[in-house]
Image: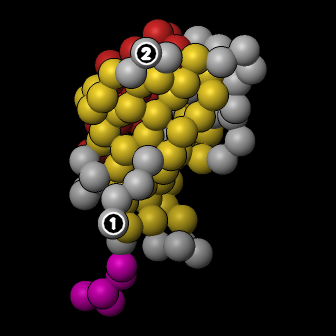
Amino acid sequence: MDGIVFFRTERLEEVVEFYTEAVGAEVWLEQSDCTILAAGDFRFGFCDREEAETDGILTFVVDSRERVDLLYDQLHTVADDEPRYNETYEIYQFFAADPEGRTVEVQVFEHETGD
């Protein structure tokens, strides 16, 4: 089963540009007033509306710390802080904000093996 998460946006072009240029997502489907993006298997869309919907967190899961750091380098101007290890969830992560203030998280799952 697949899925798509949609958000209302007041700034469709700017938001799509952010996710394609800064995050590296690709346009999966263009509709009359909605754009659906894909980042790996993660699909998410934005629909042009009179009011933006900014609740929730768009979490992008990558495969290495190096990829987290690379995305941080691209998003550092909108990031809340540098990447860090979160012991509670065993993830390396950082948070940022898109042009409308939605929270964006980039993370990699890490499991300490005790080696």
Q: Secondary structure at mark 2?
A: loop
Q: Is residue 94 visible to the viewer in this orientation of the structure?
A: no
The residue indicated by pointer 2 is 32
* Residue toward you, 114 or 3: 3
Screen quadrant of the N terminus: bottom left
Which amino acid, mark 1? Answer: Met
Image quadrant assignment for residue 72: top left
Q: Secondary structure at mark 1?
A: loop
Bin the neighbour count of mark 1 within 10 Å (Cα to Cα): few under 14, some 14-19, many 20 and up: few
Residue 53 in the image, given as x and y percentages of width and height: 70, 32
Which amino acid, mark 2? Answer: Ser
Does the magenta segment cover residue 62? Answer: no
Residue 20 in the image, given as x and y percentages of width and height: 33, 23
- Residue drawn at x 36%, y 81% is 112
Q: Is residue 33 visible to the viewer in this orientation of the structure?
A: yes
Image quadrant assignment for residue 43: top left
